[in-house]
Amino acid sequence: MEAREIIRKDMEALYLGNLNTVEFNLNLPKKGKYGSEIHWISGHERFLDTEGNVRRPAYGTGDRIISLWAEFFYKGVSETKEYKVCILEEKPRIEVTKVEPLQKKAQAGETTYLPYVAVIHTTEGKTLVHRILWGNGAKRCYGQTGGFEERGELDGLSVPVSCTVTVEKELRKEKKGTEPLIEYFDHGEASLEEGSRFYTAQKEMQEFLLQTDDDQMLYNFREACGLDRKGAEPMTGWDAPECNLKGHTTGHYLSGLALCYKAGKDGRIREKACYMIRELGKCQDAFACMPGIGEGFLSGYTEEQFDKLEKYTPYPDIWAPYYTLHKILAGLLDCYEFAGIDQAFEVAQKLGMWVYRRLSVLPVEQRMKMWGMYIAGEYGGMNDVLARLYRMSGKKEFLETACYFDNEKLFLPLEQQVDALENLHANQHIPQIIGAMEIFRGTGEKMYYDIASYFWEAVTKAHVYTIGGTGENEMFHGPGRIGSLLTKHTAESCASYNMLKLTKELYRFENQKERMDYYERTMTNHILGGREHGTTGETVYFTPLAPGFHKEFEHENSCCHGTGLESHFKYADMVYAHEGQKLYVNLFLKSRLEWKDAGITIRQMTEMEHPETVVLEVESREEFPMAVRIPGWSGEERGLWIDGKKQDTMSVESGYLCMTVPEGVHEIRCLFPCGFYLESTPDRPELHSLLYGPYVLAALSKEERFLKLDIDPGKAEQEAEKDGLTFCYRGLVWKPLFEIDREPFQVYWEKV
């Protein structure tokens, strides 16, 4: 290879870990994999020196984003690559004003565990979760019924804590019915039709999947179990052979193939999925023949990272082995459920039993400590996928194992209906809540449903930006902190992907119209707005909401790249749903529904440029009830026409426009007035965003200070020049985020 090619390959192979939330020293190599010499330059040696030593900023001074340059030299040729390193500020020194009361129920004669954490309130007005130290540990067994008072203290703070334990002869857990109220069209009955940005996104991602090298996706698995790599190139970025997260993208790829097949029934996609499953099955068999590897194991590496996690080895020495395992298991189950590949189910069950055998022998205290480890203990939605495996197989071991992942640090405050999300990693914890919903479906325990419902309410009411995304620098912050946290690192795409999954599961049991308002806002503005235009398959990691920034597409097999492989095949999932024979129309996309069991066909012809007019062509063999969501952005002057005849009276129930559709072929036309409106941030009321119907509008601007604008929505209706979904107003061009690729923009601006 020529010198420049050597340098290029070394640049691709070099991976420094997740640089978005750095707390530990970095490993900065002096030599590349292919032979380049590497010299390092730091933009601020006070916080990060050229040896990789990290000094975190003091609490209260904020995180620091440091430029770090790697200079590659080989035979007289040199090139430089810049990395952006976000070093997190130190954790605060806590002064406690209140500890939320702790209560627990236990069964006489059975082992139980006192709470590992308590919700505390601080002098700075923060609500946090803090670890408890109990005398003689948390494990208890009470020989008789009655009330007991246990005393401990907050770890490192010497603040006393007590827990009232009520011991009963027989412990009964409160139950809730698990029969879904709402059913979805989850097997291809609903599909997109040509003529929308959603359809374009789906087709372009399908083309990317068709271009993807399956053998490269299998590289790490074959390498780990000793099989022939078939001449494939190594994976890069977060899946590079040197990266401890390798294998996660392959799991997302499996899910992407399965969802793509469901969305379009393209046989070429299913063939790729079948090949992947066959080859992963061979890898699983090969692993089983290796010494020290348990039966059923499958990953992009051996069991070493799992061994180290059980010894509490921190990140970056290991990187979330159960997180990667979740992606693999989810991909296997998706291939079984949506592409009908039976072998995928067999491989998944073997892998699930490997997890059961591994975790069932560990003490509760050890598991809790593992899951509490930053990044190393992150496990994605392992509780979700194992409970789902139970639902599909009926094997109770999988449901038991799903409950091994209960995270009290997250669940306990939610049980108490307290928002203590501050300082929690957003996308680490949202999948755990999805898992709580799946465990609820398996157990009927109301507690799991309640914590999921409260979590959704807490996030959507106090932690989301105008585009529906949540988190700044991957983290939840205090409730209502939106305007003060408009940075380059807002709204991680993965978090919205998972919030939409959670919304779908909650709507299944309570068809609240507000859930679909959130779903529409986030799907349209963040998910669709986060993709790179064309067939690159790339998704933005953060959607920058600081003024004057642009979307960055880094092509590094990040977590958001992985979820992006799936998201664009889900657009049709929630357009329609049904409660018995009652049909719900929830989203307004060009689409088609073939509900064969009910003898109903619907063609929706709503144009994105005219969201105010929802047009449905309905054919049915008998009359049926239908409910069309009244979107949160619409005005009061709504209307309904059936076969061109305006209906004088309209029935509105729980935010839905309800009607009885006669048998035969009919055109239903709903008018939902659409216009400009403003939304302000709760903590900085002078900062606003401009919306038009379901669309968040961004002003094209390089200005890195907030634009100062006097915008009146009523005047904008009269004065703005409209071309499709592009508006010219106040000397600026405004577009929905999904129309913007790499241009700098402002979503938020200062109202004067």
Image: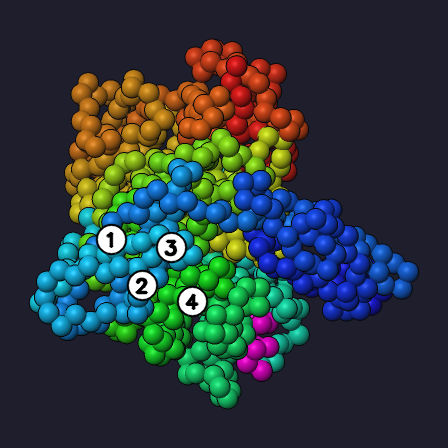
Question: Mark 2 against mark 1, which lies toward the viewer?
Answer: 2
Q: Is residue 616 visible?
A: yes
**Considering depth in this image, is 528 or 401 the residue closer to the camera?**
401
Could you tell which of marks 2 and 1 lies nearer the N-terminus? Answer: 1
Real-space Cα distance between discs 2 and 1? 13 Å
Give the residue number, with chain letter if any, for mark 1: 102
Could you tell which of marks 3 and 4 lies nearer the N-terminus? Answer: 3
**Label 2 crowding class (10 Å Cα cut-off): few <14, some 14-19, many 20+?**
some
Question: Mark 1 against mark 4, which lies toward the viewer?
Answer: 1
**678 relative to 106, above or below:** above
Question: Mark 1 against mark 3, which lies toward the viewer?
Answer: 3
Instruction: Look at label 2 and name its amino acid.
Output: Trp
What number is the disc on residue 370?
4
Secondary structure beneath dot 2 equals strand
Q: Is residue 218 magenta?
A: yes
Q: Residue at x 40, y 39 (%)?
A: 123
Residue numbers of the magenta segment: 217-226
Give the residue number, with chain letter if any, for mark 2: 134
Mark 2–mark 4 CB contact (< 8 Å): no
Instruction: Look at label 1 and name its amino acid.
Output: Leu
Real-space Cα distance between discs 2 and 4? 19 Å
Q: Quarter of the image containing the N terminus?
A: bottom right
Real-space Cα distance between discs 3 and 2? 12 Å
Instruction: Look at label 3 and name its amino acid.
Output: Ser
